[in-house]
Amino acid sequence: QVQLVESGGGLVQAGDSLRLSCAASGRTFSGYAMGWFRQAPGKEREFVATINWSGSSTRYADSVKGRFTISRDNTKNTVYLQMNSLKPEDTAVYYCATKVVSEYRYWGQGTQVTVSS
């Protein structure tokens, strides 16, 4: 079992930056890939970014590539999402998740990000 708690969301203006954090507890954090997802009102949850267990490999959705950076600190059991040049269309609840084998099995409760124009 892994428990995940996201933080760092808020209300910002277009062009601003935010850094989301996801603190993990429970099973060994460093052994798992992690991902960030988001869900906007009335839309399905969508993939944002993922990072492998060591942090050596990352992948991003096209919509955030070049603006968002995923990273992790295994000594702190934390994964981050640095979001720059935010746009109103980035407004959503952001979730982190732990990938076990081939599925994202454990999810946090989410943190709200609102970007005003």
Image (tube, helix red, strand yellow):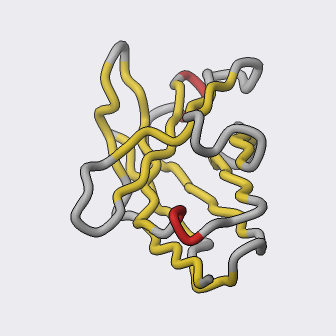
Q: Is residue 24 left or right of residue 52?
A: left
Q: Is residue 92 left or right of residue 75?
A: left
Residue shown at 69% from the left, 76% from the top = 14
Where's residue 82, x and y in %? Answer: 73, 55
Q: Nearer the viewer, residue 102 or 48?
A: 48
Q: Residue at x 59, y 84 (%)?
A: 116
Q: Using residue 90 as the reference point, say whether residue 43 is left or right of it.
A: left
Using the image, determine if residue 61 lies above or below residue 33: below
Residue 29 versus residue 111: which sits nearer the camera? 111
Q: Identify the image quadrant of residue 74.
A: top right
Residue 83 sits in quarter: bottom right
| Residue 54 versus residue 71 in the image, above or below | above
Residue 66 left/right relative to 80: right
Q: Is residue 3 above or below residue 12?
A: above
Task: Determine the residue positioned at 44% across, 47% down.
Answer: 37
Q: Position of residue 98 (x, y in %)?
A: 43, 35
Foreground residue among 77 and 66: 66
Q: How many marks?
A: 0
The C terminus lies in quadrant:
bottom right
- Which quarter of the figure is the N terminus placed in? top left
How far across and how far down the image is residue 80, in percent? 67, 51
- Please state the horizontal and vertical placement of residue 114, each as a whole percent of the image: 52, 78
Name the residue at the top extreme: 101
Relative vertical location of residue 111 with respect to residue 78 in this rendering, above or below:
below
At x 54%, y 62%, the residue is 90
